[in-house]
Image (spheres, rainbow, N blue to C red):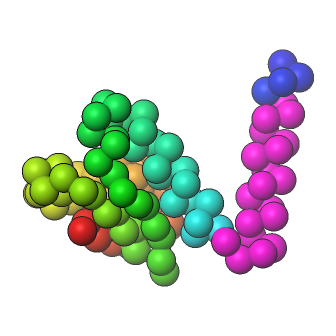
Amino acid sequence: MKKKNREFQSSDLVKSFARIHGFEEKLMAFEVKDYLNEYLNGDLFQEIESVNLNRKVLQIKIKSPLLRNDFRLRKTFFLQKFQEKFGSDHFIALEIS
């Protein structure tokens, strides 16, 4: 139980630090990338080049044309998935390139 409490406190500490120094969006982008790592299998995740968040627009760069096309076709699905997981106030749009 102490370990979970420490993890929670350190997570809050990181979020507070990010808020103070203005890189909350970068931290959220890392969380989305971690989520994609869990959601996709290893080979598909390797095709994710980068994940960025800029003014609430989530930008995902994908190397594979097939995976990129799949993400574009299911853009609304993925945006809703991210909003459910992290809160709808963090994302207003999803760009796939």
User: Residue 70 magenta-drawn?
Assistant: no
Going 46% across and 67% down the picture, which residue do you hit? 52
* Left or right: where 87 falls relative to 12: left
Whether residue 74 is visible: no
Q: Quadrant of the N terminus?
A: top right
Going 55% across and 54% down the picture, which residue do you hit? 30
Q: Quadrant of the C terminus?
A: bottom left
Q: Position of residue 32 (x, y in %)?
A: 47, 52
In the image, residue 62 above or below residue 19: above
Q: Position of residue 69 (x, y in %)?
A: 11, 57
Q: Quadrant of residue 73?
A: bottom left
The magenta-colored residue range is: 5-23
Going 41% across and 56% down the picture, which residue do you hit? 83
In the image, residue 4 above or below residue 97: above
Q: How many marks?
A: 0
Q: Position of residue 56 (x, y in %)?
A: 46, 74
Q: Position of residue 3 (x, y in %)?
A: 84, 24
In the image, residue 95 above or below residue 75: below
